[in-house]
Structures are given as structure tokens and as C-alpha cells.
Image (spheres, rainbow, N blue to C red):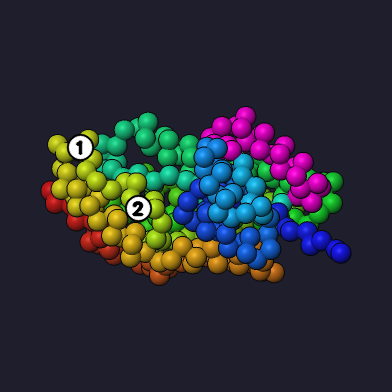
Amino acid sequence: MQTTVRPNVLITGVSTGIGFDAARFLIDRGYRVFGSVRTQGDADRVTADLGSALTPLIFDITDSAAIALAVDAVRQETCGRGLCALVNNAGISTTGPLMHMPMDEVRQMFEVNVFGLLAVTQAFLPLLGARRDCTHPPGRIVNISSISGGLVFPLVGSYGASKHAVEALTDGLRRELDIYGIKVIAIEPGNISTPMWNKNSGPDPRYAGTGYASAMTEMRAKLPETGRKGAPVELVSRAIFKAIVSQRPKTRYPLTPLWRASRMLSDGMLDRLAKAAVRIQP
């Protein structure tokens, strides 16, 4: 009996949310998924939930030595077949006014969302076909960006800055990697119903004495409800699947009308739109 060989995909950050659902969605459609997690407990849990088609890789995307070990593991497991896709999903989000946000917190946002994404991409590019002696078809890179990569809302400016950087990296990689036939795609979700919204909820006393205190309190109190009202996470998983399987994928998949608005409206109109979403009183 001939055994069907599953195409290989690497997804970073599969513990919860978008990464977990994307892994589930692709496994259901015949893929083998290598998924990054940060703890053995997460590895055990996602393996129990998703089965043997999920191979957990324990590494932090800001740890270059751990990334290198993960590359070696995937190279051995794929037996020369490489990866058909890398989905850069792992990321963090935090809130706070740019005027007062601790610089260590801003730097950490970029370490994960930007530098970690590029470090993983660089390390796995040979397995995606970025080499002269490659014997398998070129893979694809799918970067999970955000509406914040096009429209920055008050009090999440550092997150928006990191996602603007993701958009720039996506454009740069897409144009550079064309010589290898590797397509690079961005996906821009809006509000998606995932556990991430609960991580930043609740009071943040660091900004209590600032001019943003009431706006921060109000915004953070609404975050769990915003998450509950978000679009289903499978919306993103379907876009990832399209980006991987389409013969001619789009360069980006905006998943909210606000993305298009960010490209069409004037700065003044966008300022009013963004400030209306987060009420800041002087």
C-alpha cells in the first residue's frame, strides 16, 4: 500500500490562538505541521489535541541557538523534501501610550514581532528552497501582520510600529526572494477572537498618573469583550491556506475593511477614525 506523504509546513506560535487553529486547519487538509512552542507542557498539550501530524519544536524565536537546533531537527525529519511553507505567526502585543511606555517593553515587542520573525525566516530559508542546489519546489512565507500594520490606533502605537515593520519586511523579502521562486505573503487580520485579548485586560497602574489614565482604563476593560466580538479565528486559517495553495497568491490578504480604508482615506480622516475608537480626554 502506498503511503501518502504529507507536505511540510512550519508555523511559529502554535500554543493557542491563530497558530493553533492554523495548525489544526492544515493538518485536517493533509499537511504535516512543525509548530513552535516555548515549553514542554505546551508541546504535550498541542500534540494531544492535534495528533501525530503535529511535530512540536520547543524554541523561542528570539533565541538564535534554539532556532538553529530547530532547523536541524526539521531538516532531519523532512528527509530532503524541505518545507512548502513557513507561517510566521508568533508575536506579542501590549498597550500603553508611546509617551510613557518603558523602552524595554518597546524593544521586546520588536525583538519578538520583527527581529524574531526575520531570524526564523533567515534560518529556515534553505529548507524553503533558497539555495542553488535545491531539489524540491520553492516554498512560501506567510507573515501574520495586522490591521495595525496599516492603521495605528492610540495606545497601541508600539504594536502598530512593529506590524508596520512586518509589512516592510514582507515587501523586502518578496522582492528579494523572487530569484528563488519563493513567494512572500502578508495576512492582515482585524479583531480575531483569540485568548490574546485577555492578556492585556485589567488595570495597568503604571499610567495612573498620566493624561492617558482614563483612556487606558476604559480600553483595557473592553478588551475581553472586543475579543469575544472578534471574527472567528478560522478566517485567518483559511487565508493562510489560500496563501499556501493558490497558484498565484495575492501579495497580501486583508481580512478587515479597515485595511482598505487605511489605504484610501486621508491622514486627517484616519486620525479621526482612530481617535474615535479610543477616547482620549486632555
Q: Give left or right: position of 232 versus 7.
A: left
The disc at residue 167 is: none
Q: Give left or right: position of 16 versus 137.
A: left
Under mark 2, the amino acid is: Trp
**Rendered-image quadrant of the N terminus:** bottom right
Image position, residue 5 (x, y; %): 78, 59
Tell me if I can see residue 173 in this picture: no
| Above-or-below relation of 66 to 221 | above
The residue to which callout 1 is attached is 205
Query: Which quadrant would residue 203 be assigned to in this image?
Result: top left
Q: Give left or right: position of 217 versus 191.
A: left
Query: Which quadrant would residue 74 be assigned to in this image?
Result: top right
The residue to which callout 2 is attached is 197
Q: Residue at x 61, y 44 (%)?
A: 56
Residue stretch rendered in magenta on the structure? 58-82
Image position, residue 122 (x, y; %): 65, 41
| Above-or-below relation of 68 to 281 | above
The residue tagged with tag 1: helix, strand or loop?
helix
Q: Are marks 2 and 1 in contact (CB under 8 Å)?
A: no
- Residue closest to the eye, 12 or 207: 12
Is residue 80 inside the magenta stretch?
yes
Is residue 72 inside the magenta stretch?
yes
The residue tagged with tag 2: helix, strand or loop?
helix
Q: Residue at x 68, y 59 (%)?
A: 31
Query: Which quadrant would residue 268 be assigned to in this image?
Result: bottom left
Q: CA distance from mark 2 to mark 1?
A: 18 Å
Image position, residue 124 (x, y; %): 68, 43
Label 2, residues with CA under 10 Å away: few <14, some 14-19, many ≥20: many
- Residue closest to the eye, 24 or 204: 24
Under mark 1, the amino acid is: Pro
Label 1, residues with CA under 10 Å away: few <14, some 14-19, many ≥20: few
Query: Most prominent secondary structure in the magenta stretch?
Result: helix
